[in-house]
Image (cartoon, rainbow, N blue to C red):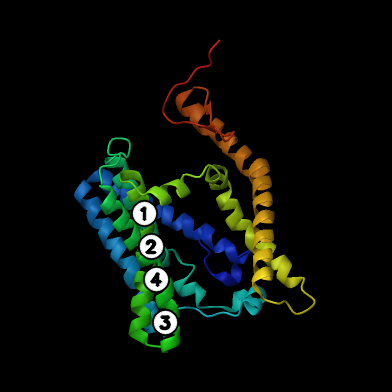
Amino acid sequence: MVNFDIKHSCQAITWYVPCDYHLTILGTLIFFFYQKKRKLGYTVFVAVLLLSMIVPGVLTYWLNFQAVILLEFGKHIMNYRDTWQFNYIYTPFYSRGSPYLVGIAMGYLTTIYKPADYRKCVPKTWSIIATAVSVCAMLFTMSIAYIIVCRGYDTLEAAIFVGTKRILWSAAICCIIGMCEYGTVPIVSNMLSWSAFTPLSRLSYGIYMVHPLVIQKFQLSQRSTHFFDFYCIFFSAVGASVISIGLSYAMWLFVEAPLINITNQLLFNKLNGAVGATATNGTQHRNGDTKTKSS
């Protein structure tokens, strides 16, 4: 839980586990200060948010890192432990703090201003404009990386980009979600409310953890030159996605869901002494409401 050195990680993707653990502790501390004194909680939140942008930028400037870590995928998939730059600006929790804190702020706002009570309080015109600006901000974040690489290396430019890219991206996503909750965004709302996202949301973490192994197996089993045309890339992407979803479902069915039920039985039954309600996803949970079976 304290290892974010990619050289000592089990797999390349498992850097996220200690990072998520550290960010959870950080969020708990911020909430503790907020419970003690609201103004103190706001102050700590803003200070940590600023540090989460300053620290990656300073490290990029100090160590002369590139704005974008350029990797050859074939070599990286085999020698990813040798990419030491990841240990400074990619895997540590302070490099991921800004989007995490933006998510906390978004969750706080939706708790104070409940969407059910403020539905469609933002006019449709402003909702569409805000969504369009957010999409442009996301496109800008992706395109500016390519522009910076093509223009050549500039230390200050790289530091500013590394320090602000994640908070800009996460703020744009939260803005789109907010406009869908509090405003009217016809096409985007319909896309995000697609029913297939409900089961995929349950499997998303497993897909994230499994898909690098699927890609590694495919790449390391190559015995001839791989042609990167549109059809091959599309075929590989669809195949990797389907296999990852299947493996994630198996992992959820045999590992995650049983552990959730066991944990809830041990914790919530001791605290409340009541039988947990069964959710639609098959796991028992406790939401504060007492439910009884009808006879």
Instruction: Give the CA separation, mark 4 to mark 3.
Output: 10 Å
Residue 199 lies, with reference to residue 144, above or below; the image says: above
Mark 3 and mark 1 lie on one chain; the one further toward the N terminus is 3
Mark 2 and mark 4 lie on one chain; the one further toward the N terminus is 2
Q: Disc 4 vs disc 3: Cβ atoms closer than 8 Å?
A: no
Foreground of the two, 200 or 269: 200
Residue that carries the numbered disc 2 in the rendered image: 135
Element marked by disc 1: helix
Q: State which quarter of the image contains the C terminus.
A: top right
Q: Which residue shows up at 57% across the image and 38% down it?
A: 260
Mark 2 and mark 3 lie on one chain; the one further toward the N terminus is 2
Task: Point out residue 147 in the picture as x, y percentages from the top left corner.
Answer: 42, 82
Mark 2 residue crowding within 10 angstroms, few (<14) / some (14–19) / many (20+)? some
Element marked by disc 3: helix
Residue flagged by tag 2: what amino acid is it? Val
Instruction: Give the CA separation, mark 4 to mark 1.
Output: 16 Å
Q: Disc 2 vs disc 3: Cβ atoms closer than 8 Å?
A: no
Residue that carries the numbered disc 4 in the rendered image: 141
Of badges 2 and 4, nearer the viewer stands: 2
Mark 1 residue crowding within 10 angstroms, few (<14) / some (14–19) / many (20+)? many
Residue 148 lies, with reference to residue 215, above or below; the image says: below
**Residue 176 image label:** 1
Mark 4 and mark 1 lie on one chain; the one further toward the N terminus is 4
Q: Is residue 13 left or right of residue 166?
A: right
Q: Disc 4 vs disc 1: Cβ atoms closer than 8 Å?
A: no
Q: Disc 1 vs disc 2: Cβ atoms closer than 8 Å?
A: yes
Residue flagged by tag 1: what amino acid is it? Ile
Instruction: Give the CA separation, mark 2 to mark 3.
Output: 18 Å
Of badges 2 and 3, nearer the viewer stands: 2
Mark 4 and mark 3 lie on one chain; the one further toward the N terminus is 4
Image-quadrant location for residue 52: bottom left
